[in-house]
Image (spheres, grey):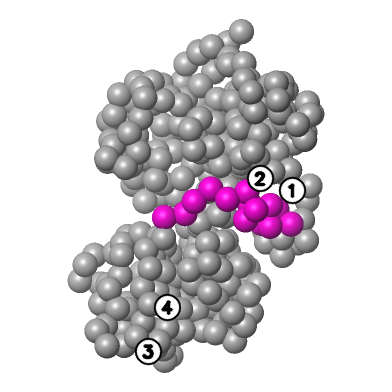
Amino acid sequence: MTMMTARIHEYGAASVIRYEISARPRPGVGEVLLRVAATSFNPTEAALRAGLLQGLLPLDLPYTLGWDVSGTVTEVGPGTPGIVVGDQVIGRLDDAGAAAEYVLAPAAALVPAPSRIPLAHAAALPVAGLTAWQAVFEQGKVAGGQRVLVNGAGGGVGGFVTQLAKHAGAQVTATASARSADTVRGQGADHVIDYTAVPVVAALDGHVDTLLNLVPLRSSDTAALASVVRPGGRIVSIATPIEPPAGAGITALHLVARNDVAHLAALVDLVDAGVVTVDISQTRPLADLAEVHRLSEAGLLRGKVLLIP
């Protein structure tokens, strides 16, 4: 049996992505076969495709793209208890690509999908949601009454960071362009700074307890942004590392998110409770994946983009 996949046979520009026929896999011990409802695009995958992450994430080519998955179990491998055909699940797949009609997944990496939203929409949760959870709660230690600056709230991770920080009881200031401002306000931001119109530092009223940085920065901008954090505060960056001012007692951390099914299950609970919403900016057929990569590299995407096989 065969299926359609979006994969690369070499590193390069978005044009190296091929939408082609490949063999449909069979699950082994501890694995399940999923009929993919959707995968979602993460900007880091464009860097992976271009070969910029070979030192960190070497690939066996051809490589099927797609780390996020939502889908329905269609086949269960031997020695795989606790999951049955028909289960709807989501997960972050570190070793298998979900940009396909079917994908093999370790059962241990999957959690039940939220019931409050369409199954396809749940594909936006794993990578971005886990990154946000760990930035806000583990490294940021955001708590009630704190002032938090979310730099880059209009992106896929930013929407979850804003909602989780607000859920933690923080007063949230978020940076976003005009096209994302209304969405970010709807996600709970108390104040929104249009970074394309005014300097972020000048627009802030006083210091913040925690800076959560989600965007690449020029080295000349990192010091200015770090200056907004109060002495003894915290900086967490998922992009450019930020050095705090000397002697300020500021904790500065660079986050590389990890796969954690307990955190993902907690996110699902918040979605089903109506606390966290999933902002889908576009839904496109999987055959459009190369175009999505091009749009991302041109800075023309916001929020989460779903790819439907």
User: Is 147 left or right of 50, judged from the image as shown?
Assistant: right
Judging from the image, what secondary structure is the residue with disc 1 in? Answer: loop
Image x and y of residue 235, in percent: 40, 74
Image x and y of residue 79, in percent: 70, 25
Q: Quadrant of residue 196?
A: bottom left
- What amino acid type is highlighted by mark number 2? Ala
Residue position marked by numbered label 2 in the rendering: 122
Which residue occupies 26% across, 83% down?
Answer: 245
Residue position marked by numbered label 4 in the rendering: 234
Q: Nearer the viewer, mark 2 or mark 4?
A: 4
Q: What separation in Å lies between label 2 and label 4 (alpha carbons)?
A: 31 Å
Residue position marked by numbered label 3 in the rendering: 231
Nearest the eye: 130 or 274: 130
* In the image, residue 115 lies in the stretch drawn in magenta: no
Label 3: how many residues lie within 10 Å, few (<14), some (14-19) or many (20+)?
Answer: some
Q: What separation in Å lies between label 1 and label 2 (alpha carbons)?
A: 7 Å
User: Is 161 left or right of 9, judged from the image as shown?
Assistant: right
Sooner in the amino-acid sequence: mark 3 or mark 2: 2
- What amino acid type is highlighted by mark number 3? Pro
Residue position marked by numbered label 1 in the rendering: 114
